[in-house]
Image (tube, grey):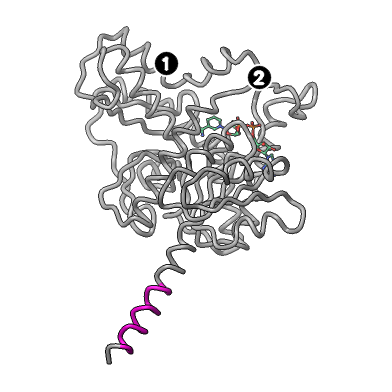
Amino acid sequence: MFAASRIASAASKRAFSTSAANLSKVAVLGAAGGIGQPLSLLMKQNPHVTELSLYDIVNTPGVAADLSHINTNSTVKGYTPENDGLKSALEGAHVVVIPAGMLPVKIPGVPRKPGMTRDDLFNTNASIVRDLAEASAKYCPDAHFLIISNPVNSTVPIFAETLKKAGVFNPKKLYGVTTLDVVRASRFVAEVKNKDPKDCKITVVGGHSGVTIVPLLSQSGETFTKEELDALTHRIQFGGDEVVQAKNGTGSATLSMAFAGARFASSVLDATVGGKKGVIEPSFVQSDLFKDQGVEYFSSNIELGAEGVEKIHGLGEISDYEKELISKAVPELQKNITKGNNFVQ
Ligand code: NAI
């Protein structure tokens, strides 16, 4: 009797540890890039991760070897397209984070052809994201997909449409990563109000570029002059440009983005693997909030649960100033989303 229960308990422990191991494989696609490397470093420090799977078209063996010496519990493997690398990188993944792509700036060594326009760049990133979505549909259709590759307002619809074509789209598990907008908003407001950013939680809604980024500063508990509102709103909407200018054509936000991406991925792991309740993050997801205005995806605070998006929060009470911002964001979002949808059609 005792021996039998010990065997049963060992068997259940084995079953638990096997499924826990599978549940915690995190794949980073574009892992050798400016965002991918520091993001992978941060994920190596996450105790929920048991296997870190790094895929890129180049250089992942080196990045993986380097990270694999860090004495946290996860194993690290690097994959390139050779030997079915994408398949191996994705199989069994619980979370797939995607910062693969090309930047809207010239980077030495990155093959951006002379005369390449923003549309060419759109097509490049759109194709990369579509191809990665096709592979994801095949090798890990049940994973949570976190899209960092820009333009997020279009790449999320592209990923969704591709998964739909394969018959495996689950809207609860596809997220456009907009965390950097709330990270910046918190930091910028803290600077103006001379506070610790941890005491400045700013909700940001809409989308993830320019005027589609709508900070709800009226809900921050702070008061602002009209000048402060204008300056902060502009800085939050176009904060990325500060980094691009400061990097002088060699890149865009990578370190702050890695921080933000790792925060979002960690929240997904906390809710889906760690069983944590009440995890709330902003994300650009399939949403009914502005569906009647033809906007199928929208970023707002979402509550994460064991299966992904559990609840989509509404905007709450917003000021006239913010209503005006939303009215500018909506038509732009419609265009961006349609562009993404059309790319896959
Ligand atoms: P990067 O050029 O340094 O890295 C991109 C990586 O993607 C490169 O290592 C490249 O080899 C890889 N890659 C290209 N095609 C691939 C494919 N088919 N499969 C796998 N990997 C592939 O660029 P960075 O700075 O890391 O930015 C990556 C993306 O993230 C860009 O689209 C950028 O606009 C976007 N981004 C998004 C932000 C957000 O808040 N969501 C913020 C900042 C950047």
Residue 330 horizontal/vertical position (percent)? 43, 32
Amino acid type at circle 2 is Thr
The residue indicated by pointer 1 is: 234
| Residue 127 visible from this viewpoint | no
Tell me which corner region of the image, top left, top right, bottom left or bottom right, holds residue 179: top left
Tell me which corner region of the image, top left, top right, bottom left or bottom right, holds residue 275: bottom left
Towards the viewer: 150 or 4:
4
Amino acid type at circle 1 is His
Which image quadrant: the N terminus? bottom left
Within 10 Å of disc 2 (Cα), the crowding (few <14, some 14-19, many 20+) is some
Residue 125 horizontal/vertical position (percent)? 66, 38
Circle nearer the viewer, 1 or 2: 2
Residue 131 horizontal/vertical position (percent)? 68, 50
Q: Secondary structure at mark 2?
A: loop
- Calculate the distance from the C-alpha at mark 1 to the C-alpha at mark 2: 23 Å
Towards the viewer: 146 or 166:
146
Q: Is residue 8 magenta?
A: yes
- Magenta part of the protein: which range? 3-15
The residue indicated by pointer 2 is: 250
| Residue 218 visible from this viewpoint | yes
Magenta portion: prevailing SS class = helix
Q: Quadrant of ligand 1?
A: top right
On screen, residue 148 versus residue 114, left or right, reads: left
Q: Specify which label sits upstream in the sequence, 1 or 2.
A: 1
Q: Is residue 283 magenta?
A: no
Q: What residue is shown at x 25% (from left), y 28% (from top)?
A: 318
